[in-house]
Amino acid sequence: MDIMTKQDLKQRERWTIKEKFPKNYLKNSDFSDLEKQLLFTRGIKDEKDVGEFLSPRYGALHDPFLMKGMDEAVKRIKTAIESNEKVIVYGDYDVDGITATAILYEVLNELGIETEYYIPKRNTEGYGLNTDALDEIAKKGTNLVITVDCGVTAVNEVVHAKKIGLNIIITDHHSIRKEGGKEVLPKTIVINPKQRKCKYPYDELSGSGIAFKIAQALYTEFPDKLTGGQEKWLLDLASLGTVCDVVPLTGENRILTYFGLRVLQKTKRAGLKMLIEASALDPNSIDSYAIGFKLGPRLNAAGRLETAEKSIQLLLTKDLNEARVLALDLNKFNQERQELTKKILSEAIVKVEKKSDKAKLYLLKGENWPAGVVGIVASKLSEKYFKPVIVCEDKGTECQGSARSPKCFNIIQALEEASEYLIRYGGHARAAGITVKKEHFVLLENKLLEISDSQIKEDDLTPEYKIDSETLLDNINAETFGFLKKLEPYGMGNPMPVFAARDVKVDSFKKVGKSFEHLKLVFTDGKVKTNGIYFSFTGDGMNLQKNVDVIFNISENEWGGRKSYEMRCIAMKDSRT
């Protein structure tokens, strides 16, 4: 089988119907067959699982002291209180990093510790701990540095910190570097559930999730200073970081996000109130989609274009007027980021189209491609071509960039194999960041092409749509949508249900949008008619006068007080092709 070209990618996509639920599945329940199918495809095995999934319990969160390093970290923080030490929370410039920073900053200040935060500048410092920043922090009389969402690979930086008199606690959730099969960790207190000897039952927490677990531990340890149960008000921050960092919304992450959304809807934070208003969102309707596509991009925008300072100020301010100004600033940054992303994406596509169709990975660089935007571009390119993509800013002597990959390829493992050509790297199986000397760029590309060629099968490069259930158009109604709401929050590990309708007729259609890039449709199966919307429809040579098969999500619209339900199209093809 030939490797697909960029032109025939659409024609080669696979539509896969997920396994149907067994005959006796949830036999004592009142669920419809469609509802049973949706529960089954989410890994729900029995009635007990149904209860835990549909009605998460806050009390089901694990004991934070089960996490390796937690006891030591809490004891070290206790020493900081007793010795009147100064503490710096060292974070990261993305949403997960700034929310984790805000969580620990607030709790440590409540404990009476003199606490400040430090967020590195993406364009000049890059990700994670760096020695120059540590030198400046030490000069301020700091005794203890607590990292959030970074630091697990900072072996040399921790050695340097100790030499200049800094104590370090590392809290991180990223993959741990290995050499010869052994973990390579900084020689200090490390909290990361991915550690081999960590007995914590769940290892998919985000950086903000781990910060919240530390807060939980501190609320337990210092009941005289911190009121029990009040840590729940930190869940608005934890849910923002969890959703935006695209960690699986399963297990504890589902619980944190489920309750975090409820806290976010009635948040006490002036900044989040103003950001919700600036995003034109109804506070009572905020869901994981609103976090991922409305609030998150605005919080990320400042760090992508300048520094994350305004974003964290927004999270921490108690002044409503200051919050309003900051929210409007972030709105403006986000608009600028969108325009810049569009420009760089078009330039990157030109570069990709010049590369061989047989390449199983793309590594790109550009002189005017800010490092804060290349991750979004890499994500869009990976989605477009269904291949691992690394996009870098050419900074002269170095290139700094971001990698994104389909699940067929572990990008962080590949970077480990190519680490001889990298200055630094870190991340996950699907997303990572790198810094490489410009003179090593081609060598890195060749090595990664060699790795990807040996590990990626040709069939892996075929986009696959996994369909929860085929359904009739008359199931697109309020009852079905009501059950879909019970399955929220959606995200990685619990995606929004995907349906397929076969052999339906396009009763009518028209192009809509500023550039007429979207398609508004009416589908019919001869019995009912249902509205549909297909965003960024390219046509793909389809004859809409013939019957089609369509893959879609179900969405709700409200206009004039009336609610309706429509098909949000994901893919469409001629029937019987």
Image (spheres, rainbow, N blue to C red):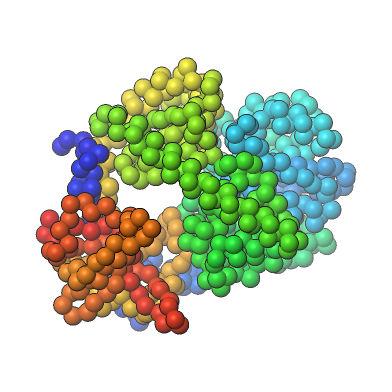
Residue at point 35%, 31% (across, down)? 351
Residue at point 73%, 62% (across, down)? 321
Q: Nearer the viewer, residue 510 or 25?
A: 510
Residue 85: x and y, percent? 85, 42
Residue 383: x and y, percent? 35, 45
Q: Is residue 360 left or right of residue 442?
A: left
Specify whether residue 345 is in view.
Answer: yes
Q: State the image quarter where residue 387 is shown.
A: top left
Q: Identify the image quadrant of the N terminus.
A: top left
Residue at point 79%, 47% (across, down)? 115
Q: Is residue 481 left or right of residue 310?
A: left
Residue 370: x and y, percent? 52, 35
Q: Is residue 211 left or right of residue 86?
A: left
Q: Identify the image quadrant of the C terminus.
A: bottom left
Q: Is residue 556 above or below residue 462?
A: below
Q: Looking at this rendering, what residue extends furthest in the right direction? A: 83
Residue at point 14%, 64% (across, down)? 545
Q: Nearer the viewer, residue 315 or 254?
A: 315
Labels in figure, total: 0
Q: Is residue 424 above or below residue 237?
A: above
Q: Is residue 165 above or below residue 511?
A: above
Residue 346: x and y, percent? 38, 39
Specify whether residue 499 is in view.
Answer: no
Q: Is residue 507 left or right of residue 396?
A: left
